[in-house]
Image: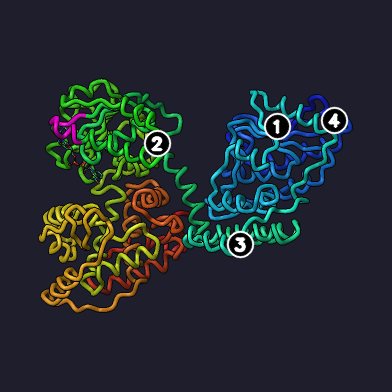
Amino acid sequence: MSEVAAYTVRDGVAVITMNNPPVNGLGNALRAAILQGLQRAAGDAQVKAAVLIGAGKAFSGGADIREFGKAREKPDLPEVNDFQDGMQKPLVAAITGFALGGGLELALACHYRIASAKSQLGLPEVKLGILPGSGGTQRLPRIVPASKAVQMMTTGNPISAEEALQLGLVDEIVQGADLAAAAVLYANKLVAERKPLKRIRDMKANADVDFKKVRDAVARASRGYPAPLEIVACVEAAVTKPFDEGRKFERERFAHLIMTNESKALRHAFFAERQTAKIPDVPDETPTRTVKQAAVIGAGTMGGGIAMSFLNVGIPVTITDTTQDALDRGLKKIRENYAATVSKGRLKQEEMDKRMALLSSATDLNAARDADIIVEAVFERMDVKQDLFRRLDAIAKPGAILATNTSTLDVNQIADATKRPQEVIGTHFFSPANVMRLLEVVRGAKTGKDVLATTMKLGKTLKKVPVVSGVCDGFIGNRMLEKYVQQSLFMLDEGASPQQIDGALQKWGLAMGPFTMYDMAGNDIGFEIRKRRAKERPDFVYGKFADRIAEKGWFGQKTGRGWYRYEPGNRKPIPDAEVDRMLAAYRKEMGLKARPISDDEIVERCIYALANEGAHILEEGIALRASDIDMVYLTGYGFPPYGGGPMFYADTAGLDKVLAAIQKFQQGYQGAQWKPAALLIKLAKEGRRFND
Ligand code: NAD
């Protein structure tokens, strides 16, 4: 029939097999082939029923993401669904693996559905800021209770075949391996028993919900994202309107959502995540090494979290530290972390035991001898790291990857302490390393391509989002953050309070404002960085008030006081009148005049500072693409998903507007610290975007 779908007749049943790897994405060719197969089955006098099934591991994962943003050819999915509805012979969807999005909509337009036991069914469109646009919002509430339909579509989470069976979404679960044979039997049984054609479109929805209450609950949970509420409106239409009217309404709401900035940002993030692994001069077929055994050096905050990241995916780890004491403390913390997850019911005790059994420890560095990768997480000092790498060079097995978790030091200098700089790479985990998804993979000047490819692959195995960064101070994320910090401190000088700045940025959507973040990370860390900067780069100016806080020993949460006050055992920041008084006195002493600063100015200055530094980073080739920078902020710095990342946010605002704003800031307080990137100026002039 065609390359993407096969048509065969078995025992009087037409079997249309979708074959569009990897997930039977419903691209132009497949939709046309399905329709052709259905038409053929309808017109074939020998055929009494038809089965729709997926070759490979899936029924269908929905729209073909490779065709996103490209013109759709006819027939579209609603046309295919209309033909399904009109069929006079029983049509059975045979679901293996998963039926998601358009894939489930295709199955919902069949008369019956059978599924293999392990399959998953869902409508995840909300995760891209849209809604199921081919009848999903109208058919699902006609087959499962409306409350369940709302829940499935507003969370986007799939349900198991077992649950689908209980809900009536699936008619039968098939235990055996040959789903196609079972589907043919099932179809023949329908024919023999003269079962009616169960058209969901003709059914009445089960309205088991109070829509006002549902709307309120969904509005609270969706925090400003428009898609969930639109989904509720569509389900309400399914309950109150005839099918065709509901379909029309769904189509309108879909067309509206697809144009929103939120959806554009979520779709950008979806593709950005899939892009990070693509490195222009390291092709996909670059050979990778096997990583079966890891070692972590340093059992501190980061070392423990990094070790857990390996254990969580079943890779054995040996952890070393200089003293038994340090090691014991580190091991205790790992055990406590797992135990806390077990007590919350999110991990089984057996699973914890299994993970802990993969962990060994030693005070002797030689224990790292057999590891395929050694990740160093010791003190942030060049002499300490170089000495360690010299020793690792002497003991590590040939072909072992030597990785450093440094946040600021020059990976090339660390690599040059060894005789095998091609094996050295940076793996910059974020704290807590067992939780945070971001992994900056720092490519040294001499890092081997296979070492880079292996580390990127390992990042995915560890369930991280690996993003390549070149060597520079702070790599991508922290280098940009420094400009953001700089603006936040300048605004204190100019008249804003820590809580106003945090409040404005949190309201805008950041997971936490800068001053809450400083208190969490420890104000001693920023203090050290500023002291170092004053020597290394005296041209980089900071607001001085932060030093007053650090000099008092107010390091933040860990000392119970910082930019905010903290009650014992509570991490909630409480505004501190004493800090306000100190700030007022400081301004007086420095001859600074406070002025009112609007929330909009706070957001623009902080976020444009990130985007402008991101542009410098792009210019210098430190990041491979703007979307990688966006991923760094989305997965490592609590950037709101609906902003799409700082580069995407600047794109959305319009680079000409961003440039104009920066030029205005150049006229303001400490304006000389703003240097619009040449790339920003160029793109703004050409009317282009970072993420073109
Ligand atoms: P930490 O002080 O909590 O832990 C460091 C550990 O290394 C200590 O247990 C120490 O005993 C051990 N150690 C020191 N020298 C050693 C040696 N020669 N051999 C073996 N063990 C040694 O520090 P941390 O916060 O875990 O930071 C570790 C590294 O990770 C640093 O390079 C830091 O810049 C980087 N990093 C930290 C964070 C963070 O948020 N803390 C985030 C990203 C990266």
Q: Between 137 and 422, which is closer to the camera in this rendering?
A: 137
Q: Which amino acid does label 1 sit on?
A: Thr
Q: Which amino acid does label 2 sit on?
A: Leu
Q: Nearer the viewer, mark 1 or mark 4?
A: 4
Q: Nearer the viewer, mark 1 or mark 2?
A: 2
Residue 593 located left or right of residue 27: left
Q: Which of marks 4 and 3 is in front?
A: 3
Q: Are marks 4 and 3 in contact (CB under 8 Å)?
A: no
Q: Which callout, 4 or 3, points at the residue further toward the start of the chain?
A: 4
Expressed as whole percent of the image width and height from the top left, the position of residue 372 reads: 30, 24
Expressed as whole percent of the image width and height from the top left, the position of residue 179 reads: 68, 27
Residue 273 located left or right of residue 210: left
Residue 17 — which label?
1
Residue that extends furthest to the right in the rendered view of this protein? 45
Q: Is mark 3 on a helix, strand or loop?
A: helix
Residue beneath disc 3: 211
Ligand 1 falls in quadrant: top left
